[in-house]
Amino acid sequence: MTETFHQLRDQPVGEIAAQFPGTSAVFRRFGIEFCCQGHVSLADAANHRNLDLNELEKELVALDPAAAPEIPQGTGDLIDYIRSRYHGRHRAQLEDLIELSRKVESVHVNHQNVPAGMAHILRQFRAELEKLMNKQETTHFPALQKKTPDELKLSLQFMRHDHAEFAFFLDQIDCLTDDCTPPEDACASWQALYADLSAFKADLIEHIHLENNVLFPRFESSGRD
Protein backbone atom coordinates (compact mmCIF):
# COMPACT_ATOMS: atom_id res chain seq x y z
CA MET A 1 0.00 0.00 0.00
CA THR A 2 2.89 2.36 0.78
CA GLU A 3 4.23 1.84 -2.73
CA THR A 4 0.80 2.61 -4.15
CA PHE A 5 0.65 6.12 -2.70
CA HIS A 6 4.36 6.73 -3.31
CA GLN A 7 3.73 6.07 -6.99
CA LEU A 8 0.82 8.52 -6.97
CA ARG A 9 2.86 11.59 -6.05
CA ASP A 10 2.57 12.91 -9.59
CA GLN A 11 -1.11 11.98 -9.99
CA PRO A 12 -3.95 14.56 -9.71
CA VAL A 13 -5.48 14.68 -6.24
CA GLY A 14 -8.98 14.55 -7.74
CA GLU A 15 -8.22 11.22 -9.40
CA ILE A 16 -6.68 9.88 -6.18
CA ALA A 17 -9.76 10.87 -4.19
CA ALA A 18 -11.99 9.18 -6.76
CA GLN A 19 -9.90 6.00 -6.86
CA PHE A 20 -9.17 5.37 -3.17
CA PRO A 21 -12.07 5.42 -0.67
CA GLY A 22 -11.46 7.60 2.37
CA THR A 23 -8.74 9.79 0.87
CA SER A 24 -11.09 12.79 0.60
CA ALA A 25 -11.37 12.93 4.40
CA VAL A 26 -7.57 13.02 4.71
CA PHE A 27 -7.33 15.74 2.08
CA ARG A 28 -9.91 17.85 3.94
CA ARG A 29 -8.00 17.43 7.19
CA PHE A 30 -4.76 18.59 5.57
CA GLY A 31 -6.48 21.45 3.75
CA ILE A 32 -5.82 20.03 0.27
CA GLU A 33 -8.24 21.33 -2.38
CA PHE A 34 -9.24 18.26 -4.39
CA CYS A 35 -12.59 19.38 -5.82
CA CYS A 36 -12.16 22.40 -8.06
CA GLN A 37 -8.36 22.02 -8.02
CA GLY A 38 -8.43 18.29 -8.58
CA HIS A 39 -5.98 18.53 -11.49
CA VAL A 40 -3.08 19.43 -9.15
CA SER A 41 -0.67 16.59 -8.36
CA LEU A 42 -0.36 15.18 -4.84
CA ALA A 43 3.23 16.42 -4.58
CA ASP A 44 2.35 19.93 -5.75
CA ALA A 45 -0.69 20.11 -3.47
CA ALA A 46 1.46 19.15 -0.48
CA ASN A 47 4.12 21.67 -1.46
CA HIS A 48 1.50 24.43 -1.84
CA ARG A 49 0.31 23.77 1.73
CA ASN A 50 3.88 23.38 3.07
CA LEU A 51 3.06 19.81 4.09
CA ASP A 52 5.43 16.93 4.73
CA LEU A 53 4.63 14.63 1.79
CA ASN A 54 5.89 11.57 3.68
CA GLU A 55 3.58 12.36 6.61
CA LEU A 56 0.67 12.80 4.23
CA GLU A 57 1.40 9.45 2.62
CA LYS A 58 1.46 7.78 6.06
CA GLU A 59 -2.03 9.10 6.73
CA LEU A 60 -3.24 7.80 3.37
CA VAL A 61 -1.67 4.38 3.91
CA ALA A 62 -3.38 4.10 7.31
CA LEU A 63 -6.84 4.42 5.75
CA ASP A 64 -9.33 1.59 6.05
CA PRO A 65 -11.15 1.44 2.69
CA ALA A 66 -13.97 -0.56 4.27
CA ALA A 67 -14.79 2.37 6.57
CA ALA A 68 -15.55 4.73 3.68
CA PRO A 69 -19.16 5.21 2.50
CA GLU A 70 -20.15 2.93 -0.37
CA ILE A 71 -20.66 4.94 -3.56
CA PRO A 72 -22.88 3.51 -6.33
CA GLN A 73 -20.92 2.40 -9.39
CA GLY A 74 -23.58 2.78 -12.07
CA THR A 75 -23.88 6.27 -13.50
CA GLY A 76 -27.66 6.48 -13.12
CA ASP A 77 -27.41 5.19 -9.56
CA LEU A 78 -24.64 7.69 -8.79
CA ILE A 79 -26.78 10.59 -10.05
CA ASP A 80 -29.68 9.38 -7.90
CA TYR A 81 -27.35 9.05 -4.91
CA ILE A 82 -26.01 12.60 -5.31
CA ARG A 83 -29.51 14.01 -5.61
CA SER A 84 -30.95 12.09 -2.64
CA ARG A 85 -27.89 12.26 -0.38
CA TYR A 86 -26.88 15.89 -0.86
CA HIS A 87 -29.59 18.11 -2.36
CA GLY A 88 -32.17 17.74 0.38
CA ARG A 89 -29.50 17.73 3.06
CA HIS A 90 -27.97 21.00 1.84
CA ARG A 91 -31.38 22.67 1.82
CA ALA A 92 -32.06 21.63 5.42
CA GLN A 93 -28.52 22.50 6.56
CA LEU A 94 -28.60 26.01 5.14
CA GLU A 95 -32.02 26.79 6.58
CA ASP A 96 -30.80 25.84 10.06
CA LEU A 97 -27.45 27.59 9.63
CA ILE A 98 -29.04 30.88 8.58
CA GLU A 99 -31.35 30.87 11.60
CA LEU A 100 -28.52 29.99 13.99
CA SER A 101 -26.27 32.64 12.43
CA ARG A 102 -28.96 35.30 12.96
CA LYS A 103 -29.19 34.30 16.62
CA VAL A 104 -25.44 34.36 17.25
CA GLU A 105 -24.97 37.68 15.43
CA SER A 106 -27.81 39.26 17.38
CA VAL A 107 -26.90 38.00 20.85
CA HIS A 108 -23.16 38.62 20.48
CA VAL A 109 -23.29 41.78 18.35
CA ASN A 110 -20.67 43.50 20.56
CA HIS A 111 -18.25 40.56 20.68
CA GLN A 112 -15.03 41.24 18.77
CA ASN A 113 -15.10 37.78 17.16
CA VAL A 114 -18.76 37.66 16.17
CA PRO A 115 -19.15 36.42 12.54
CA ALA A 116 -20.89 39.61 11.45
CA GLY A 117 -22.64 39.19 8.12
CA MET A 118 -22.63 35.38 8.20
CA ALA A 119 -26.40 35.06 7.85
CA HIS A 120 -26.32 37.35 4.81
CA ILE A 121 -23.50 35.36 3.19
CA LEU A 122 -25.35 32.10 3.81
CA ARG A 123 -28.55 33.51 2.30
CA GLN A 124 -26.61 34.51 -0.81
CA PHE A 125 -24.97 31.11 -0.96
CA ARG A 126 -28.30 29.33 -0.52
CA ALA A 127 -29.74 31.25 -3.47
CA GLU A 128 -26.80 30.30 -5.72
CA LEU A 129 -26.72 26.67 -4.60
CA GLU A 130 -30.50 26.33 -4.92
CA LYS A 131 -30.33 27.71 -8.45
CA LEU A 132 -27.72 25.10 -9.42
CA MET A 133 -29.48 22.18 -7.71
CA ASN A 134 -32.79 23.08 -9.37
CA LYS A 135 -31.04 23.30 -12.74
CA GLN A 136 -29.38 19.94 -12.13
CA GLU A 137 -32.67 18.28 -11.23
CA THR A 138 -34.60 19.69 -14.19
CA THR A 139 -31.98 20.04 -16.94
CA HIS A 140 -28.38 18.96 -16.28
CA PHE A 141 -28.89 15.48 -14.82
CA PRO A 142 -31.49 14.53 -17.45
CA ALA A 143 -29.04 15.75 -20.12
CA LEU A 144 -26.30 13.53 -18.66
CA GLN A 145 -28.56 10.50 -18.65
CA LYS A 146 -29.82 11.15 -22.20
CA LYS A 147 -26.32 12.07 -23.33
CA THR A 148 -27.36 14.64 -25.92
CA PRO A 149 -23.94 15.91 -27.16
CA ASP A 150 -24.61 19.66 -27.24
CA GLU A 151 -26.61 19.71 -24.00
CA LEU A 152 -24.06 17.46 -22.35
CA LYS A 153 -21.11 19.75 -23.08
CA LEU A 154 -22.95 22.86 -21.91
CA SER A 155 -24.21 21.14 -18.76
CA LEU A 156 -20.74 20.01 -17.72
CA GLN A 157 -19.24 23.44 -18.36
CA PHE A 158 -22.03 25.15 -16.45
CA MET A 159 -21.75 22.88 -13.40
CA ARG A 160 -17.96 23.04 -13.20
CA HIS A 161 -18.12 26.84 -13.41
CA ASP A 162 -20.63 27.04 -10.56
CA HIS A 163 -18.59 24.67 -8.44
CA ALA A 164 -15.56 26.92 -8.86
CA GLU A 165 -17.66 29.94 -7.84
CA PHE A 166 -18.70 28.22 -4.61
CA ALA A 167 -15.08 28.34 -3.41
CA PHE A 168 -15.55 32.09 -2.91
CA PHE A 169 -18.36 31.53 -0.41
CA LEU A 170 -16.41 28.85 1.45
CA ASP A 171 -13.45 31.22 1.73
CA GLN A 172 -15.76 33.88 3.20
CA ILE A 173 -17.02 31.41 5.79
CA ASP A 174 -13.47 30.44 6.76
CA CYS A 175 -12.43 34.08 7.00
CA LEU A 176 -15.35 35.10 9.22
CA THR A 177 -15.08 32.08 11.51
CA ASP A 178 -11.29 31.58 11.73
CA ASP A 179 -11.78 28.22 9.99
CA CYS A 180 -14.81 27.43 12.16
CA THR A 181 -12.87 27.89 15.40
CA PRO A 182 -15.10 29.39 18.12
CA PRO A 183 -13.59 31.76 20.70
CA GLU A 184 -12.94 30.37 24.18
CA ASP A 185 -15.96 32.17 25.64
CA ALA A 186 -18.36 31.06 22.89
CA CYS A 187 -21.82 30.03 24.08
CA ALA A 188 -23.42 26.70 23.16
CA SER A 189 -25.24 28.22 20.16
CA TRP A 190 -22.02 29.73 18.81
CA GLN A 191 -20.19 26.42 19.18
CA ALA A 192 -23.09 24.59 17.50
CA LEU A 193 -23.04 27.08 14.61
CA TYR A 194 -19.37 26.44 13.89
CA ALA A 195 -19.73 22.67 14.28
CA ASP A 196 -22.67 22.68 11.87
CA LEU A 197 -20.79 24.93 9.43
CA SER A 198 -17.89 22.45 9.46
CA ALA A 199 -20.27 19.58 8.75
CA PHE A 200 -21.92 21.52 5.92
CA LYS A 201 -18.56 22.36 4.35
CA ALA A 202 -17.47 18.71 4.53
CA ASP A 203 -20.71 17.57 2.90
CA LEU A 204 -20.50 20.21 0.16
CA ILE A 205 -16.87 19.40 -0.61
CA GLU A 206 -17.67 15.68 -0.85
CA HIS A 207 -20.67 16.50 -3.05
CA ILE A 208 -18.59 18.60 -5.46
CA HIS A 209 -15.85 15.95 -5.47
CA LEU A 210 -18.29 13.22 -6.51
CA GLU A 211 -19.49 15.34 -9.41
CA ASN A 212 -16.19 16.88 -10.57
CA ASN A 213 -13.93 13.86 -10.09
CA VAL A 214 -16.22 10.83 -10.37
CA LEU A 215 -19.38 11.65 -12.34
CA PHE A 216 -18.32 14.26 -14.91
CA PRO A 217 -15.17 12.46 -16.17
CA ARG A 218 -17.36 9.52 -17.24
CA PHE A 219 -19.00 11.80 -19.83
CA GLU A 220 -15.85 13.71 -20.73
CA SER A 221 -14.04 10.52 -21.67
CA SER A 222 -15.62 7.10 -22.03
CA GLY A 223 -19.32 7.90 -21.73
CA ARG A 224 -21.97 6.76 -19.33
CA ASP A 225 -22.82 3.32 -17.90
Image: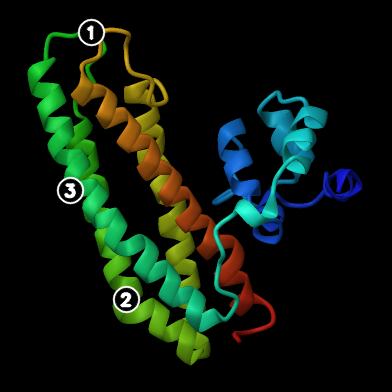
Query: Quick check: 212 left or right of 166?
Result: right
Say which residue appears at 51% left-offset and 89% top-offset.
147
Q: Say whether marks 1 and 3 touch (CB < 8 Å).
A: no
- SS under mark 3: helix
The residues bearing labels 1 and 3 have C-alpha atoms spaced at a distance of: 25 Å
The residues bearing labels 2 and 3 have C-alpha atoms spaced at a distance of: 20 Å
Say which residue appears at 38% left-offset and 41% top-offset.
199
User: Pointer 2: what residue?
Assistant: 137
- SS under mark 2: helix
Tag nearer the camera, 1 or 3? 3
Chain-order first, disc 2 or disc 3? 3
Amino acid found under the numbered disc labelled 2 = Glu
Mark 3 neighbour density, 10 Å: few (under 14) some (14–19) many (20 or more): few
Report the disc number at residue 68.
none
The residues bearing labels 2 and 1 have C-alpha atoms spaced at a distance of: 42 Å
Residue 4 position, x and y percent, is 87, 50
Q: Which of 131 and 77 is in front in this view?
A: 77
Chain-order first, disc 1 or disc 3? 3
Mark 2 neighbour density, 10 Å: few (under 14) some (14–19) many (20 or more): some
User: Pointer 1: what residue?
Assistant: 112
Display coloring: rainbow
- Which corner quadrant holds the C terminus? bottom right
Residue 16, quarter of the rendered image: bottom right
Residue 144 position, x and y percent, is 48, 82
User: Pointer 3: what residue?
Assistant: 95
Q: Which of 32 and 140 is in front in this view?
A: 32
